[in-house]
Amino acid sequence: MSSAASESFLELRELAASAGAQIVAEVFQVRPEATAATLLGSGKVQELKELAEATQADVLIVDNDLSPTQQRNLEAEVGVRVIDRTQLILDIFAGRARTAEGRLQVELAQLKYLLPRLAGKGISLSRLGGGIGTRGPGETKLETDRRRIAVRIKKLEVDLEKVRTGRALHRGKREAVPVPTVSLAGYTNAGKSTLFNRLTAAGVLADAKMFATLDPTVRAITLPSRRRILLSDTVGFVRNLPTTLIEAFRATLEEVADAALILHVVDVSADNAGTHVAEVFRILTEIGASETPQVLVLNKCDQLDINERTIHGPASDAQVLGARLLAEARQSNSAPSVLVSGLTGEGIARLFDQIDAVLPFDAVETVRFRIPLRDGGSIALLHEYGKVRAEAYHGNVCEIVVEAPLSLRRRLNRYLLKNSTEPVENSVQN
């Protein structure tokens, strides 16, 4: 079994476990080309039939996308229900969706998957024959089901378009108030939700299962520079993520595409981390987010073997590991890297500093303000949203040297001293 096939099979095992399946046997086949009728060779199909009978299995999971014909033929030959990789992921998503939007997205993807597979689903949907005078209730039922599903798909698409419009309005309101959005993105089970909880104390479900978090969550946090940002946690990506899912979840994925910065979270302890990085880059490109600035967050560093770390310290470790992963993913992207552990909190301070350094929106500069004491509100704003370096009082005026974001400098521009380098006398250092 090739390395890529082994990784895909391992991932299928994790997906099946996440769906609640108990694996009783595994079978792998290498063929120069797929069989049109059943994907697998006739000998392998017979082996699966005997294995299903011996283990009393009730479902066969195939690590490929099956055509409707292949799925029906395999079910007839093996004698158990057959599902493919896409249907397995859809089943997991259906169990994890919590919000109304998430349920709409999952239902749309499921119906688009089901529509071409209606023919032959049970006796009531069977075709009775062809030609004049042979059309019976089975064919009528099939056509009725197709029409009802098509109508439902149309309604779901309209409802999700309203969701996209609503999200656009919310984004417009957020952009009116200069608070940038930073999105967590990464392969499923990379520890995004654990990291999100560490950064925001949000209490989002964090589980060692694939797609444990499906619905996006947004929280406001304050960086060490006193800049406020909105941090969003989104659905994890996976190898060969079905096109129907990408289309259905486009309203959610737009949050990633419109972010000012993407924190690309990687399980650095995983053997196939480079493959995961490549897959995330592929999906980011597909949703139009490839040009968004990124920070490569090498999560789960607490699980690294001590011999995997260099003697140069965590910062050097991060750059070496990050460069290696990007090279494995065949990416020329020079995104900065940070080693962290969402579980223990290691490296979180460095991550905050990196966000401050990379985030292009609302840049921070050290400036000087001269504010009348009667405007105590403006002084309070500088203390709340800036990082005060020095402060002095002269009569009825307060002079403050502060690291302030662009939005705050614009707001208090009337008090800003241009090109002033004199020291603040009688200052109170913070």
Image (tube, rainbow, N blue to C red):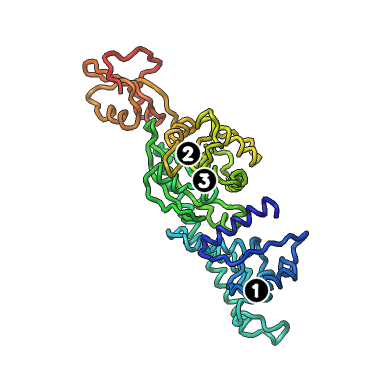
Residue at 72%, 68% in the rendered image: 44
Disc 2 secondary structure class: loop
Q: Residues within 10 Å of mark 3 (few under 14, many from 20)?
A: many
Residue at 67%, 66% in the rendered image: 67
Horizontal arrangement in the rendering, residue 73 relative to residue 186 (left or right): right
Q: Earlier in the sequence, mark 3 or mark 2?
A: 3
Q: Amino acid at mark 1?
A: Glu
Q: Position of residue 129 (x, y in %)?
A: 70, 83
Q: Residue furthest front?
A: 307
Q: Earlier in the sequence, mark 2 or mark 1?
A: 1
Q: Amino acid at mark 3?
A: Ala
Disc 1 secondary structure class: helix
Horizontal arrangement in the rendering, residue 35 relative to residue 212 (left or right): right
Disc on res. 332: none
Q: Earlier in the sequence, mark 3 or mark 1?
A: 1
Disc on res. 185: 3
Q: Nearer the viewer, residue 272 or 117?
A: 272
Q: Nearer the viewer, residue 178 or 126?
A: 126
Q: Position of residue 132 (x, y in %)?
A: 72, 85
Q: Residues within 10 Å of mark 2 (few under 14, many from 20)?
A: many
Q: Which residue is mark 2?
A: 340
Q: Position of residue 4 (x, y in %)?
A: 67, 51
The CA span between labels 3 and 1 is 37 Å
Q: Which residue is mark 1?
A: 75
Residue at 28%, 22% in the rendered image: 371
